[in-house]
Image (cartoon, rainbow, N blue to C red):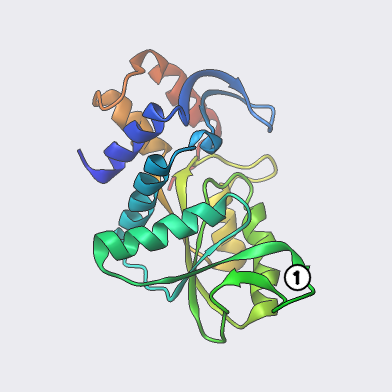
Amino acid sequence: MTYKEEFIKFMVDCGVLKFGTFTLKSGRIAPYFINTGNYKTGAQLSRLGSYYAACYEENGLDAETLVGPAYKGIPLAVSTAIALYNDHGKEVNYCFDRKEVKDHGEGGLFVGKTLEDGERVVLIEDVMTSGKALREMFPKLEAAAKTEVVGMIISVDRMEKGLQSELSAVQEVYKEFGVKVYAIVNMEDIIKAIEDGVIEGKEYLPAMRAYRAQYGVNA
């Protein structure tokens, strides 16, 4: 299996990717649901970091620091930094933001690597629904230093248009900020994995295809 196929099976095995009938926050009725909160063991986090690192390498990203938006991005950035070193021999810094600026001790908004002007950073996040995390992170990065955001990695690109736009969240972020978002897998990968028997769920294929036809966007 490719690392993308392995990752899709990994999500199913962890109970992160499920198929059925789900009412999303948007009000849409979806035939699948992704709950990254179901990652909960050290072994899972270690493998998750390896998949993020593989995506980083596949897309030729070159950053000095990985930034994990609080809170879900924190363990992801840490595990990816570890995997880049263990799997690929690359030592990369990491940092994450505080929800509130620390006004005592060393102070500051970020924990970990102190960001500097001209520093190349890659954001590490779980999934992107609206791009809210990136929109909240940009002012924090700009307040810390004049960094260069060379990309963002997420686990799954839903390839789904927004409620107020014909663009997906990934496309909107690129249009607004010029930041390329790289996903380990997207919905077309998941559908193909079902078709090829990598994971079970062929009974859900008609609903998956219909949902893509109604709400989906091209990559």
**Residue marked by disc 1:** 102
Q: Residue at x 63, y 56 (%)?
A: 70
Q: Amino acid at mark 1?
A: Lys
Residue 110 vertical placement versus 18 (above, below): below
**Crowdedness near tag 1: few (<14), some (14–19) or many (≥20) residues, C-alpha within 10 Å:** few
Q: Quadrant of residue 115?
A: bottom right
Residue lying furthest top: 203
Q: Quadrant of residue 206?
A: top left
Rendered location of residue 8, percent (x, y): 35, 35
Rendered location of residue 114, percent (x, y): 57, 79
User: In the displayed structure, does residue 213 sit left or right of residue 185?
Assistant: right
Of the 4 image quadrants, the one containing the N terminus is top left
Q: Residue at x 38, y 12 (%)?
A: 203
Q: Residue at x 35, y 34 (%)?
A: 10
Residue 212 vertical placement versus 65 (above, below): above
Residue lying furthest left: 1
Q: Residue at x 38, y 36 (%)?
A: 188
Determine whether the residue tagged by mark 1 lies in a helix, strand or loop: strand
